[in-house]
Amino acid sequence: MNWLDRLRGQPSPRETAKQRLQVILVHDRSDLSPGLLEVIKDEIIAVLSRHVPIIAEEVRVTVTQDARECRLVADIPLGNRHSRS
Amino acid sequence: MSAQVITVTSGKGGVGKTTVTANVGMALAMAGKKVVCIDADIGLRNLDVVLGLENRIVYDIVHVVEGRCRTRQALIRDKRVPDLYLMPAAQSRDKSAVKPEDMVRICEELRPEFDYILIDSAAGIEEGFRTALAPADLILLVTNPEVAAVRDADRVVGLVEAMGKPTPKLIVNRLKPDMVRRGDMLDTSDVLEILAIELLGVIPEDEQVIVATNRGTPVVLEERSPAGQAFRAIARRLMGEAVPLFLSEDGQGVLGWLRRLVRSGGGR
């Protein structure tokens, strides 16, 4: 990596490789493709909406990992029933 | 005596499995251990060439499996060190010629006579991989510090755990410390953080390895070769010694330069 790229704040090939690997392995390890995560998200929204008000646009479904343990994490902001007009 | 069976595997091909098997096997033999290296890459045998024993093959592992010779008859003794043997693979057959249970049976027969049995696995994660893994007490996972090799290594870790085998120990092969320092290559610490398994050793890129393979004299026989030193360190760790790791992490700045100077001057 040359000094000009470094000055421009470009990530080094080493950092790029590491970041790419981390993303690739999250999907390899969990056998969950980004497309499938979208499907899961839509279904979670559909099910939960029947019971509680949620802010559908802000729902996030992601896979996180700690060492070799993968975890499916859904972040679901609840809508406030009373403040809604 | 009951040998420890060590299988060397990688997932991706071409990362240096055979080189690791030959050199670690020879380093263990140089340290006075009784060692047999088994080439489990049926149809694509190479361990014989890397060890320089290709002209002495009469029988191979498939002959043993098919009962056409006794197990001992397929063992070629390396004359450069006291107790190193090779059981070659067959070149004209395919992976299905040796089944996992055959490999287990051969290892059971050899165990009482040796300290270490090293198995050079075939690349990939199919039949040959499972056969090589079946008798393993310890699995060495070889990778290079690059995206495709680390990705495949991760897959192997998952498969090995699913098979109920112990988690592999990692060997990072062909690391270029200068490239790491420039930010152009993954460092050992990056690979370790991603794979989250125990590190057994790091082998620096070394042109001597190619020279050694051309000659059929494993690089570990070269006293001054950096790769040879790394292989000897791995062998000592396998024998239970605490040998400090070669990490390019401490290679930065004046302090790192001094540290390297002291280390290389220390001689081994």
Image (spheres, grey):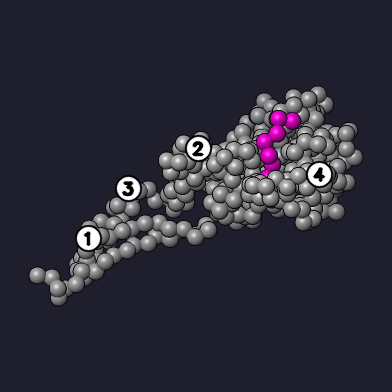
Query: Which of the two marks, 2 or 1, is nearer to us in this view?
Result: 2
In space, the residues marked 3 and 1 are separated at their CA atoms by 17 Å
In space, the residues marked 2 and 3 are separated at their CA atoms by 38 Å
Which class describes the residues within 10 Å of circle 2: few (<14), some (14-19), or many (20+)?
A: few
Which residue bears the numbered disc 1?
A: A56
Residue at the (59%, 51%) spot, across then down: B189
Q: Chain of mark 2?
A: A
In the rendered image, which quarter contains the C terminus of chain A? bottom left
Q: Amino acid at mark 4?
A: Gly
Residues rendered magenta in the picture: B200-208
Q: Is residue B75 above or below residue A43?
A: above
Please indicate, yes or no, whether residue B79 appears anywhere in the rendered image.
yes
**Regarding mark 2 in the picture, which secondary structure is present there?**
helix
Which labelled disc corresponds to residue A35? 3
Answer yes or no: are tags 2 and 1 on the same subunit: yes
Q: Nearer the viewer, residue A78 or A28?
A: A78
**Regarding mark 1 in the picture, which secondary structure is present there?**
helix
